[in-house]
Image (cartoon, coloured by chain):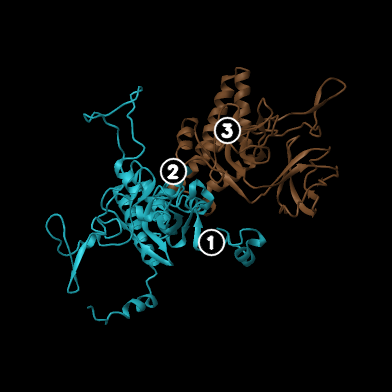
């Protein structure tokens, strides 16, 4: 990214949006990466020579994608209301989720992923259990599967300790201040901590591109924190990399080209791989921002007695 | 032409020597000398767009030719795409070396000295020397001689280089989201007549400029006819054209002419002599 004046940086030279250049100095653009690689790491005297630009572009983008998955820590956040269908459509640049929360009464409540299925596909069957087809041979499907129908109509029971729990609302007796319940089979001892959560639960249906929630999430605000692959919906001009990772990107491109090229000695490939790995580790440490000021706040609690 | 083509093979040899560490330092930098020689033939011109039968611009451009650019390309060096169109319109007044458009807002559009102005009717281009005002530009070349003529103004600093791709590769390249040509990373393919640019939105005169090695101009021995019918050499004629070769290649040129003359008059000894001299020269 070219150097810009303070007026361009703070006020976008009077144009809108005003914040277009804020923080831009942290990043190096995809165009700069490809151009710099062609100039500095490719050519007659270099290990990489006679390679088409589109190959360099491809490997640069792949490296950026990989960095976005775990190293960048650039988490995107989207807030949407969960409607009557109890679905949250995944954002167009969604790759994986980091945290899903319910925002209610000013509190952000992290939600648990339901360990059971919340949604299902279904086929229509006759009384003998045979699957029904239309005249074109396509399978007939109900509008909703039974599990979906129950979930959408607040009939589905939950193993979580929320309002949908099977024991919620059951009659009991209070004797000497202790509550006793009568269960159909056996008795309950202790608590399954995995499901001991009052908040709504969810499942991510990756292929369908939605997050399915249980019925307690209807008309509630959902905050999705997720990671993308940094490809900015195909707009090359918006693809950037944090400068901490600039050297790593060059090393990654070089390694990928040498690794897939015929006749390159193994020690050359190995050297390139080690260089790439070392630079990635260094960049990850740098981006972690570990410094005394941050550690101090955590260490202040070290002498606290754990009860 | 033979000597001209030899320059490219000489360049290749010099690169090989340089890689073998037997040449390329200080006064032994042969590559540098050949590069400078080759660059004498380097030409830079905007390519003329192909207009479809419906009268619309296409992403195809005519290769350099005597009709479009005034010379022919021996080899393309690079294709540049100017990706920032700053202003466009039609001129309203003819002033020599100026572009005047009463409806323009050149200052507001960010037009600055150095930007490229193209005449989209006669396919001529000029560079902005100064922005006189919102409606007036001073140009380095007089390209507007009538009104109304449509023009485009491109930023000279906002550009991207197009990559040559074979026709067999362009489909696969365009399908992949990671490699698909874009305005930042454009590509082009060639056929016998046209160059096609990708993505296909790259259209219009002034947006695509080719840098290429042109063929040497054909030498023309001009003369005036004397009273007794004998022609006398006259280099003041407007169509006079000398050989476009460096002085050090004069000997090679003479030997080549001698060879061809020998063949022409069927004089074996002359041909053999010229060939042996040529071989001796290249061995040295």
Circle 3 is placed at which residue position? B196
The image quarter in which residue A191 lies: bottom left
Label 3: how many Cα within 10 Å (few below 14, some 14–19, many 20+): many
Count up the numbered dots.
3
Name the residue located 75 percent from the left edge and 35 percent from the top edge: B121
**Are dots 1 and 3 on a single chain?**
no
Chain letter of the residue beneath label 3 in the structure image: B
Circle 2 is placed at which residue position? A55
Circle 1 is placed at which residue position? A24
The mark that comes first in sequence, 2 or 1, is 1
Label 1: how many Cα within 10 Å (few below 14, some 14–19, many 20+): some
Tag nearer the camera, 2 or 1: 1
Name the residue located 37 percent from the left edge and 60 percent from the top edge: A279
SS of the residue under disc 3 = strand
Question: In the figure, the brown chain has which letter?
Answer: B
Q: Which of B156 and B147 is in front in this view?
A: B147
Image coordinates of residue B103 in percent, x first then y, are: 80, 47
SS of the residue under disc 2 = helix
Q: Is A247 above or below relative to A60?
A: below
Q: Nearer the viewer, residue B22 or A131?
A: A131
Image coordinates of residue B72 in percent, x first then y, are: 65, 32
SS of the residue under disc 1 = helix
Chain letter of the residue beneath label 1 in the structure image: A
Tag nearer the camera, 1 or 3: 1
Chain letter of the residue beneath label 2 in the structure image: A
Q: Is B148 above or below relative to A255?
A: above
* Chain A colour as displayed: cyan
**Hey, which residue is sitting farthest top in the picture?**
B266
């Amino acid at each position: 990214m070219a150097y810009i004046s303070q007026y361009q940086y703070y006020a976008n030279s009077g144009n809108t949006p005003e914040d277009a250049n804020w923080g831009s100095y942290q990043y190096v653009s995809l165009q700069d990466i490809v151009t710099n690689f062609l100039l500095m790491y490719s050519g007659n005297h270099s290990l990489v020579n006679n390679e088409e630009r589109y190959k360099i572009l491809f490997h640069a983008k792949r490296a950026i994608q990989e960095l976005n998955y775990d190293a960048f820590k650039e988490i995107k956040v989207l807030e949407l209301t969960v409607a009557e269908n109890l679905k949250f459509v995944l954002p167009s640049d969604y790759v994986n989720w980091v945290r899903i929360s319910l925002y209610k009464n000013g509190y952000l409540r992290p939600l648990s992923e339901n360990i059971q299925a919340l949604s299902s596909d279904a086929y229509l069957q006759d009384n003998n259990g045979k699957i029904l087809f239309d005249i074109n041979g396509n399978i007939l499907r109900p509008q909703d599967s039974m599990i979906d129908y129950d979930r959408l109509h607040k009939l589905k029971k939950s193993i979580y300790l929320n309002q949908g729990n099977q024991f919620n609302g059951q009659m009991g007796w209070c004797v000497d201040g202790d509550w006793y319940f009568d269960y159909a089979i056996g008795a309950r001892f202790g608590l399954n901590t995995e499901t001991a959560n009052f908040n709504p639960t969810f499942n991510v249906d990756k292929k369908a591109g939605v997050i399915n929630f249980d019925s307690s999430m209807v008309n509630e605000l959902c905050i999705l924190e997720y990671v993308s692959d940094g490809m900015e919906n195909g707009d090359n001009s918006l693809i950037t990399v944090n400068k901490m990772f600039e050297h790593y990107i060059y090393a990654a491109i070089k390694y990928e080209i040498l690794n897939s090229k015929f006749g390159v000695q193994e020690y050359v490939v190995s050297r390139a791989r080690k260089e790439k790995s070392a630079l990635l580790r260094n960049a990850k440490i740098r981006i972690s921002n570990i410094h005394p000021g941050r550690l101090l706040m955590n260490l202040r609690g070290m002498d606290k007695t754990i009860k | 032409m033979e000597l001209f083509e030899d320059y490219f093979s000489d360049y290749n040899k010099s690169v090989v020597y340089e890689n073998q560490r037997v040449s390329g330092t200080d006064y032994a930098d042969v590559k540098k000398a050949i590069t400078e020689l080759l660059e004498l033939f380097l030409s830079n011109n905007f390519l003329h767009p192909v207009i479809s039968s419906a009268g619309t611009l296409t992403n195809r451009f005519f290769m350099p030719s005597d009709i479009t650019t005034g010379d022919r390309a021996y080899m393309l060096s690079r294709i540049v795409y100017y990706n920032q169109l700053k202003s466009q319109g039609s001129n309203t007044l003819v002033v020599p070396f100026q572009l005047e458009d009463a409806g323009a807002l050149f200052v507001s559009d960010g037009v600055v000295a150095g930007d490229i102005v193209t005449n989209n009717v006669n396919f001529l281009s000029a560079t902005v020397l100064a922005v006189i005002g919102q409606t007036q530009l001073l140009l380095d070349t007089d390209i507007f001689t009538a009104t109304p003529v449509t023009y485009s103004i491109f930023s000279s600093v906002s550009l991207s280089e197009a990559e040559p791709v074979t026709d067999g590769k362009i489909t696969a390249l365009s399908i992949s989201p990671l490699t698909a040509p874009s305005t930042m990373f454009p590509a082009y393919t060639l056929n016998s007549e046209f160059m096609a640019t990708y993505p296909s939105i790259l259209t219009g005169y002034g947006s695509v400029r080719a840098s290429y090695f042109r063929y040497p101009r054909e030498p023309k021995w001009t003369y005036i006819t004397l009273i007794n019918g004998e022609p006398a050499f006259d280099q003041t004629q407007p169509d006079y054209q000398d050989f476009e070769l460096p002085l050090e290649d004069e000997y090679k040129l003479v030997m080549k002419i001698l060879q061809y003359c020998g063949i022409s008059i069927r004089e074996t000894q002359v041909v053999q002599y010229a060939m042996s001299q040529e071989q001796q020269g290249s061995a040295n």
